[in-house]
Image: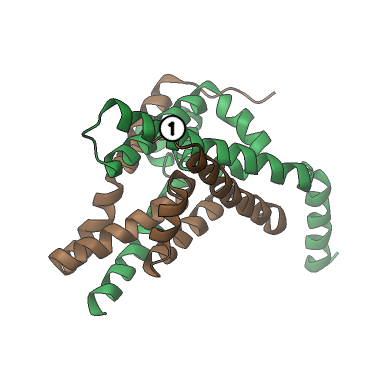
Amino acid sequence: MNELERNERYNAYVEAKMPKTKPWPSLFHAFWVGGLICCLGELIKDLCLYFFPYMTTQDAATWSLVALIILAALFTGLGIFDRIGAYAGAGTIIPITGFSNSIASPAVEFKREGLVFGLMSKMFIIAGPVIVSGVVASIVVGIIYLFI
Amino acid sequence: MFDPIMYLKVFAIGGLVCLIGQILIITTKMTSARILVSFLLLGVALEALGLFQPIKEFAGSGITIPIIGFGASLAHGAIDAGNTMGLLGVFTGGLTATAAGIAAAVLAGYIVGLIFNSKTKK
């Protein structure tokens, strides 16, 4: 059996073993859960502005981000996030809750490999690429804007 | 504040962004890390082209809560601080604008990691 044939057979095997998600319902699930999480963010922002009238809109928006991040991390620890995520797919990954989950989930998972080389390093296994690409891209954009 | 029409717009745009993400996951089998990075870079691009602010005025949290908003504030911070402080501002601006989010995620992730243990999958 040559290598090409073996790879093909392996891909077919992976295809057969992969959990099947029906495409159409999952689109709807992602839409309503994602929309709802954004509405929750808007609600927290409005509540901040309502209870603290002197807060700027920008600060209120930042507070709502922080609140969603903390909630998502807590839900990840409690094991609730995974269940919502299995239902909603991108609906929980794309909002900032997905970023928070991508840090909290490996933190819990890799704790048994030790505090420093487990928890603290592996928590950036997904968030690391996100921060690196974001920082590099923003500096490139900032430098371009310096010259125009 | 508490404007129902605004909530409708937030729901529609926020849902639409997640719907596009779900289509990408289904059609390209991208992992969640790649999805997060691509939407973040999309946010940086939207901000760089000046398209993010109009969408933000229209949809509020519908576009700032998705990771697109995170990328946009990175770029916005770098551009803004670059205008006032020059090259040094380009370096400090992006992370300054997103510091609250990153710090909250690191702190919350660390504490959750300390408290909770992973459940073995059944």
Instruction: Return the residue found at the far bottom.
Output: A148
Q: Position of residue A59 (x, y in %)?
A: 27, 40
What color is chain B drawn in?
A: brown
Is residue B17 found left or right of A18 in the rendered image? left
What color is chain A drawn in?
A: green
Q: Nearer the viewer, residue A94 or A5?
A: A94
Placement of B23 over or under A54, stated as above or below: below
Q: Amino acid at mark 1?
A: Leu
Please identify the quadrant where the C terminus of chain B is shown: top right
Q: Residue at x 21, y 57 (%)?
A: B92
Can residue B109 be seen in the rendering of this structure? no
Instruction: Return the residue found at the far left.
Output: B85
Q: Count the marks: how many? A: 1
Q: Position of residue B119 (x, y in %)?
A: 58, 22
Please identify the quadrant where the N terminus of chain B is shown: top left
Q: Position of residue B15 (x, y in %)?
A: 59, 45
Is residue A76 found left or right of A3 in the rendered image? left
Number of residues whose C-alpha sits closer than 10 Å to that of mark 1, classed few (under 14), some (14–19) or many (20 or more): some
Is residue B83 found left or right of A45 in the rendered image? left
Its colouring scheme is by chain
Q: Nearer the viewer, residue B74 or A73?
A: B74
Q: Position of residue A28 (x, y in %)?
A: 70, 43
Per the image, the residue denoted by label 1 is A43
Q: Residue at x 61, y 35 (%)?
A: A85
Q: Residue at x 59, y 48 (%)?
A: B18
Q: Nearer the viewer, residue A43 or B115?
A: A43
* Helix, strand or loop at mark 1: helix
Placement of A118 over or under B84, stated as above or below: above
Can residue A22 be seen in the rendering of this structure? yes
- Asked which quadrant contains residue A120, the reply is top left
Task: State which chain disc 1 sits on.
Answer: A
